[in-house]
Image (cartoon, rainbow, N blue to C red):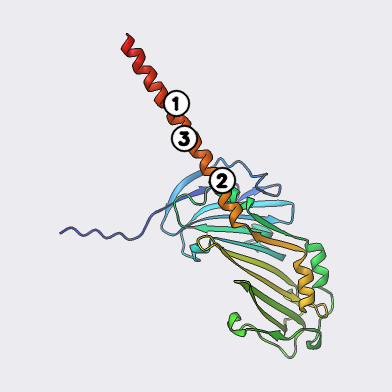
Amino acid sequence: MLIIIKEGCSLKCYQCSGLMDDTISINYTITAEHFPQLNNCSTVTTEHYCYAGIYWYKSETSYLQIIAEFEESFDPDSGINTYIVDPPSNFGSVFNATHYLIHSCNTDNCNDPMNLRLLLKSLKISADLIKIKPLLSSNQPVNKSSCLIFSNDTDSFEGSCTIDDQCNYCDMTMITKSLKSYVCCGCSYTDPSQSDDYQFQVQMSCNMKEKKCQHQIHLNCNVPQCNFLENVKRIQQMYENEFNFDTFVQSTANAINSTETCLFLIKLSIVYFIVYFWEKKAKN
């Protein structure tokens, strides 16, 4: 009896190269309407998942990564993750980003650049960071009485909802899923020489199979009452971070229909040519 053991499933992914290894620098803001033409792309094989990412630095520069991931670093079923951060995230001194979109998937060629463009059509991601920062950041530390101390579900934060008696900045984390929000507002301490007393971060995680998204906002701030829910609501009016599944499904269907129409016309042309050839041969 012959037994065949397969060590892993092979997955085909797009891999695009740029001037900075696998990172492609674009000197404008990438959108669905202004998406770069990528020429240095090939198909490679991995046993993990495909990855595509767009990173924006304010409205000045964009960075693009379309690669095959060769290390199992996170769950590919998460679909897409988006972030808005300030101060900007530093990616290994290669570039900074204030907004980014990460798409991970585990079907052949699912990180096709055109699929990434369809994701952009369905995504709204923006923030007025210039207006948001003064609501959260100042040159003076705060004390415990200046911060809101509140939590409606400490279990959701895995013990991270803490209160320091000698705090010098307020913090707040809100997780929203299935139309319910879990909030942790507290007061923490950091070394004054560090920059942790100001942080604004918005995250969205969407599961493409279940068509569900989880939203999270995290604040570190040192303006009195900056983590009060009234202030948080003001800040939420100053950014967008939403994904429309209906738009994505429709865009994908349109792209498939367009491709199928093109293939049909090609096949029809081939059939016409064969019939024409045989009729001409029969006459001779």
How much space separates mark 3 and mark 1, taking CA atoms? 10 Å
Compared to 253, does 237 lie above or below? below
Q: Which residue is mark 1?
A: 269
Q: Position of residue 254 (x, y in %)?
A: 56, 44
| The residue positioned farthest toward the left in the image shown | 1
Q: Which residue is mark 3?
A: 263
Q: Secondary structure at mark 2?
A: helix
Identify the residue at image location x=40%, y=26%.
Answer: 271
The amino acid marked with disc number 3 is Leu
Pointer 3 local density, CA inside 10 Å: few below 14, some 14–19, many at least 20: few
Disc number at residue 239? none
Q: Position of residue 24 (x, y in %)?
A: 61, 49
Disc number at residue 114? 2
Is 153 in front, or is 192? 153
In the rendered image, which quarter is residue 57 located in? Answer: bottom right
Does any portion of residue 9 appear in the rendered image? yes
Compared to 63, does 41 lie above or below? above
The reply to whether discs 1 and 2 touch (Cβ–Cβ < 8 Å) is no
Q: Secondary structure at mark 3?
A: helix
Q: Secondary structure at mark 1?
A: helix
In the rendered image, which quarter is residue 230 located in? Answer: bottom right
Task: Looking at the image, tell me whether mark 1 or mark 2 is earlier in sequence order.
Answer: 2
The reply to whether discs 3 and 1 touch (Cβ–Cβ < 8 Å) is no
Pointer 1 local density, CA inside 10 Å: few below 14, some 14–19, many at least 20: few
Is 13 in front, or is 106? 106
In the rendered image, which quarter is residue 211 located in? Answer: bottom right
Left or right: where does residue 181 sit relative to residue 166?
Answer: left
Task: Looking at the image, tell me whether mark 3 or mark 1 is earlier in sequence order.
Answer: 3
Pointer 2 local density, CA inside 10 Å: few below 14, some 14–19, many at least 20: some
The amino acid marked with disc number 1 is Ser
Identify the residue at image location x=44%, y=49%.
Answer: 44
